[in-house]
């Protein structure tokens, strides 16, 4: 079983472009490039499309008619799951934590346009939500499939193993790849994919939540490697993690907001305050600390987040 043997649906428009950021390269004194997974072709784009290609292939194969997922009120993942499920003729049901902006703005507005059933649960514990999925699934009496928060299990992580392979096929070598880490699947897939397909590339995960990613990242990498029957020796030589959470998950940070503005003003590209702005702030900090050596090429993975940008306001 290797990556190409794992069932996968086509939901996005791949490969996503890679291009240089000339103005910010000049400003930071580094050779900076961006991979545009914000242009992944479903909804308003974003990283969850790659995960859903694998997850919903399994759902379809199992005969699921209902697709459940979860997240915060402004979850980009939940919105994209709804968009994908609709396109595939399945019924999405989103059971979201009653945390964050629940008003009809941002991703909530998009879910309304998608005609999606949204249920808010006043809990901080995802196990309550997964139990509610089983209860509702049984009540509806139709076959259902549960996708975890962020689509971050081993199967979903394969989306970013595939992304690393796509980067290799695009033909340029990068010394560093920088991405956000929110529920872990993107970073784990990218770090595993780099070990397999991008020799000499180090992946840096910018943690925007406070979960124990030092444990989650290698575990997801090992589980994803097992799915594709790859033998890898996972050590922290292959990747590193950096805390960019600031005041808390989904709460904008001053550095993150400044990074959002820099990307908009210099390059005409929009980041978001929850994930990509904080991740890009981490890249800027690394550049200022001299973490990228002369002549090295740095790739920033733009994971999307446009939906949340219209709901989560700047604090300063
Ligand atoms: C979910 C998300 C991330 C984080 O990806 P994980 O795989 O959950 O770590 C990054 N950026 C955006 C815009 C997201 O929606």
Image (cartoon, rainbow, N blue to C red):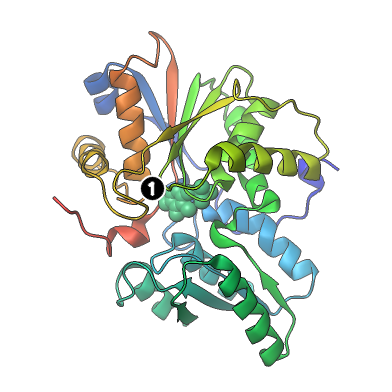
Asked whether 248 or 172 is in front, the reply is: 248
* Secondary structure found at label 1: loop
Measuring from the top left, give residue 139's x and y in whole percent: 67, 91
Left or right: where does residue 137 sit relative to residue 309?
Answer: right
Q: Is residue 307 above or below residue 136?
A: above
Q: Is residue 38 above or below residue 17?
A: below
Measuring from the top left, give residue 276's x and y in whole percent: 37, 44
Count neighbours of disc 1 (C-alpha within 10 A) and say few if under 14, some if 14 to 19, many if 20 or more: many
Q: Can residue 46 be seen in this view?
A: no
Q: Is residue 51 above or below residue 4?
A: below
Q: In percent of the image, x 30 and y 50: which residue is there?
A: 273
Q: Is residue 137 above or below residue 277?
A: below
Residue annotated with mark 1: 275
Q: Can residue 235 be seen in this view?
A: yes
Left or right: where does residue 267 sit relative to residue 120?
Answer: left
User: Which quadrant holds residue 301?
Assistant: top left
Q: In percent of the image, x 26 and y 27: which residue is there?
A: 24
Name, please, the residue furthest toward the right: 1
Measuring from the top left, give residue 310's x and y in whole percent: 27, 62
Is the CB of mark 1 within 8 Å of ligand 1?
yes
User: Which quadrant holds residue 295?
Assistant: top left
Left or right: where does residue 176 sit relative to residue 139?
Answer: left
């Amino acid at each position: 079983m290797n990556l190409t043997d794992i069932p996968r649906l086509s939901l996005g428009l791949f490969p996503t472009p890679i291009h240089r950021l000339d103005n910010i390269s000049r400003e930071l004194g580094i050779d900076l490039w961006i991979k545009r997974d914000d242009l992944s072709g479903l909804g308003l784009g974003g990283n969850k499309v790659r995960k859903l290609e694998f997850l919903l292939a399994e759902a379809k194969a199992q005969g699921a008619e209902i697709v459940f997922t979860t997240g915060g009120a402004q979850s980009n993942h939940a919105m994209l799951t709804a968009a994908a499920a609709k396109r595939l003729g399945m019924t999405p049901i989103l059971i979201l934590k009653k945390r964050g902006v629940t008003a009809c703005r941002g991703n909530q507005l998009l879910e309304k346009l998608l005609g999606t059933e949204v249920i808010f649960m006043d809990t901080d514990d995802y196990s309550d939500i997964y139990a509610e999925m089983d209860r509702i699934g049984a009540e509806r009496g139709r076959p259902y499939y549960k996708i975890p928060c962020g689509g971050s299990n081993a199967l979903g992580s394969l989306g970013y193993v595939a992304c690393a392979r796509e980067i290799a096929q695009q033909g340029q070598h990068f010394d560093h790849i920088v991405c956000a880490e929110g529920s872990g699947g993107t970073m784990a897939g990218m770090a595993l994919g780099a070990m397999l397909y991008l020799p000499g590339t180090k992946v840096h995960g910018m943690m925007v939540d406070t979960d124990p990613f030092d444990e989650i990242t290698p575990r997801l990498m090992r589980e994803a490697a097992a799915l594709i029957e790859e033998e890898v020796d996972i050590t922290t030589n292959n990747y590193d993690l950096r805390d960019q959470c600031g005041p808390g998950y989904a709460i904008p940070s001053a550095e993150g907001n400044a990074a959002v503005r820099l990307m908009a003003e210099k390059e005409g590209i929009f980041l978001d305050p929850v994930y990509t702005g904080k991740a890009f702030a981490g890249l800027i900090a690394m550049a200022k600390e001299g973490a990228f050596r002369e002549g090295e090429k740095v790739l920033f993975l733009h994971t999307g987040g446009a939906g949340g940008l219209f709901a989560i306001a700047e604090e300063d």
